Image (spheres, rainbow, N blue to C red):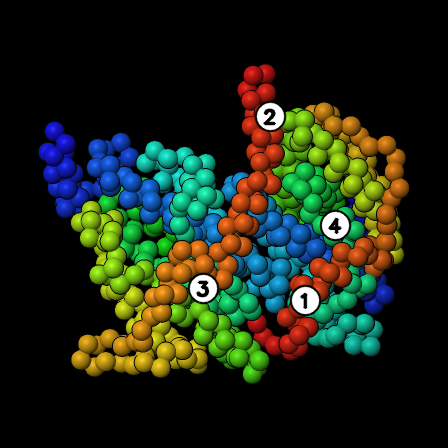
């Protein structure tokens, strides 16, 4: 009986027993995971674009090699995540189709442009930093393949964050022009970064069920606060400021208070009206369409060789 | 066979430095081109593969530049045409196009996947045979870099051979695209074996490399069902600093920050 299965399933989740691909699971659980994991995979792939943009312009050979390796890691993350989603009964081609037709979303942060070298630093520090804050709890996600993929992703992300911090630290110790470049990048990326935690808890419709299923462990607002508390301290070490006049330590709450997020901008970018939504999706579609003949040739060759 | 570069005098040291810069420039420029595919590959696994190859090339370039810088910094300043002290970055970022000694084949735009993989196939075949010679180089540092790089190049060669075969023997479209790529790239292949001042002592080995290279191309093309091209005009000059219009554009992009904000740490 479905009802009894639901109860058994929830018992397993409550006891922290991992759900594996062949186990019974509620259809809604499966769909939620497909949505979340594929969205995460798409974010990795789309996320390669704004940083990939600066590989050919990296200011030293060392930075170039690190950035290239970093963007390549993101492709690797996409690969593990697509594979994890495939265990739930959806193919990679179907997920791409959903991305290309706009049905599937990806993290809105990648719809902002990378305008200077300092953006590479800020993406590592803030964007990867926010991603880690979101993703570390996912290493304990109730779904086994997702949790295991996330362990590896998080290890690499923490390296990415350090390289970003290091870029900014170096710029902070540099010339006036370099410091200006870094502060400008922080100013542009700060608010979009804290939007990465999603809407406020009372406007986040999927959260309650996801917490119950232990797909999600902390609320959007909890994670956002934790991130802001960390960054407010780190920015002092870097010698820059965060562009929020309301940011200040609240002794009673033992947290930083912060200003009002521009939720209109948040929803606009999600709806496809951000500065680079169109370019990002077009770039992915172009890579996919231009690559079609290559994939066809590889398939044809493999078929011939199998027959032979 | 040994590269018989005498390092007893400054002149010969300059020759060696030029040779190192030539090796580094080749790796850097083809690495730059390969890195342009990152995030734009035809399928995720191949995006990762070509980014990895780009990383290998950039790593090779760094090793050769670092060693060239070390040797340059030992020379009396008046004998050097470069800004001293040299580093891997002054050599990559502060030389002009006509100082670059890379082969023209490395700087051509990527074109499609057929052009890209065929270029890497032609170039890595060359590197494969060249580095096999260089591991016996009398200069232990050059030999060590060659040995490390040879492992990478062996993979590049296998990967690119597989693509040439797969596309040659894939669909009608992939066969045609591979043919187009052969005709476009062939005029840039013979420069790889052309002698010049700093390669002079390597004359004998270049002749041998050319023989091995021809054999490799012939075998892979045969398996791919691709025709060997007829004799065609051949473009040369890269090693002497006469480049295509593409190199200055690559350098404008690559050197942007170092040129716009001189003397900064990054």
Q: Are marks 4 and 2 in contact (CB under 8 Å)?
A: no
Q: Are marks 4 and 3 on the same chain?
A: no
Residue A229 seen in this snapshot: yes
Which numbered marker is on residue B255? Answer: 1
Q: Chain of mark 4?
A: B
Residue B7 seen in this snapshot: no
Q: Which residue in the structure is indicated by mark 3?
A: A124
Q: Chain of mark 1?
A: B
For image coordinates 39% across by 69% down, the residue present is A191
Q: Which residue in the structure is indicated by mark 4?
A: B108
Q: Are marks 2 and 1 in contact (CB under 8 Å)?
A: no
| Element carrying mark 3 | helix
Q: How many marks?
A: 4
Give the spatial CA distance, label 1 vs label 4. 18 Å
Give the spatial CA distance, label 3 vs label 1. 23 Å
Q: Residues within 10 Å of mark 1 (few under 14, many from 20)?
A: many
Query: In the image shown, does B210 or A176 lie closer to the viewer?
Result: A176
For image coordinates 60% across by 35% down, the residue present is A294
């Amino acid at each position: 009986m479905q009802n009894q299965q639901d109860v058994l399933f929830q018992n397993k989740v409550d006891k922290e027993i991992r759900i594996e691909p062949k186990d019974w699971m509620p259809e809604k659980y499966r769909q939620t995971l497909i949505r979340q994991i594929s969205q995460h995979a798409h974010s990795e792939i789309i996320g390669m674009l704004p940083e990939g943009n600066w590989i050919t312009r990296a200011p030293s050979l060392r930075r170039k090699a690190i950035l290239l390796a970093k963007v390549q890691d993101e492709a690797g993350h996409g690969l593990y995540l697509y594979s994890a989603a495939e265990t739930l009964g959806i193919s990679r081609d179907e997920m791409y189709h959903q991305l290309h037709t706009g049905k599937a979303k990806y993290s809105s942060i990648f719809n902002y442009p990378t305008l200077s070298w300092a953006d590479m630093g800020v993406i590592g520090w803030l964007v990867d930093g926010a991603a880690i804050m979101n993703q570390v709890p996912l290493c304990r996600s109730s779904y086994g393949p997702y949790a295991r993929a996330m362990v590896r992703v998080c290890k690499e992300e923490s390296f990415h964050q350090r390289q970003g911090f290091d870029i900014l630290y170096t710029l902070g110790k540099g010339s006036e022009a370099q410091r200006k470049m870094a502060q400008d990048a922080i100013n542009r990326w700060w608010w979009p970064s804290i939007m990465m935690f999603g809407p406020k808890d009372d406007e986040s419709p999927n959260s309650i069920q996801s917490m119950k299923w232990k797909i999600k462990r902390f609320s959007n607002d909890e994670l956002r606060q934790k991130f802001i508390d960390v960054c407010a301290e780190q920015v002092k070490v870097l010698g820059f400021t965060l562009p929020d006049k309301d940011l200040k330590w609240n002794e009673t709450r033992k947290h930083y208070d912060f200003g009002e997020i521009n939720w209109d901008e948040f929803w606009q970018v999600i709806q496809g009206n951000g500065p680079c939504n169109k370019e990002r999706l077009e770039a992915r579609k172009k890579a996919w369409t231009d690559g079609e003949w290559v994939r066809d040739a590889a398939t044809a060759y493999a078929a011939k060789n199998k027959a032979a | 066979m040994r590269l018989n570069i005498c390092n007893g005098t400054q002149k010969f040291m300059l020759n060696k430095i030029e040779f190192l810069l030539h090796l580094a420039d080749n790796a850097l420029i083809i690495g730059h081109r390969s890195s342009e595919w990152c995030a734009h590959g035809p399928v995720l696994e191949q995006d990762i593969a070509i980014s990895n190859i780009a990383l290998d090339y950039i790593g090779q370039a760094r090793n050769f530049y670092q060693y060239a810088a070390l040797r340059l910094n030992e020379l009396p300043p008046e004998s050097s045409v470069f800004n001293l002290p040299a580093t891997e970055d002054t050599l990559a970022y502060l030389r002009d196009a006509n100082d670059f000694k890379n082969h023209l084949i490395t700087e051509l735009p990527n074109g499609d996947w057929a052009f890209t993989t065929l270029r890497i196939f032609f170039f890595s075949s060359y590197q494969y045979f060249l580095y096999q010679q260089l591991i016996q180089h009398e200069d232990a540092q050059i030999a060590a870099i060659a040995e490390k790089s040879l492992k990478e190049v062996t993979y590049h060669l296998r990967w690119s051979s597989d693509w040439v075969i797969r596309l040659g023997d894939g669909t009608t479209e992939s066969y045609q695209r591979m043919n187009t790529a052969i005709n476009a790239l062939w005029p840039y292949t013979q420069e790889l074996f052309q002698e010049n001042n700093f390669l002079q002592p390597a004359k004998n080995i270049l002749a041998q490399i050319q023989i091995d290279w021809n054999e490799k191309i012939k075998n892979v093309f045969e398996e791919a069902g691709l025709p060997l091209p007829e004799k065609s005009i051949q473009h040369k000059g890269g090693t002497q600093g006469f480049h295509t219009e593409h190199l200055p554009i690559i350098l404008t992009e690559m050197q942007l920050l170092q040129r716009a904000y001189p003397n900064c740490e990054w």
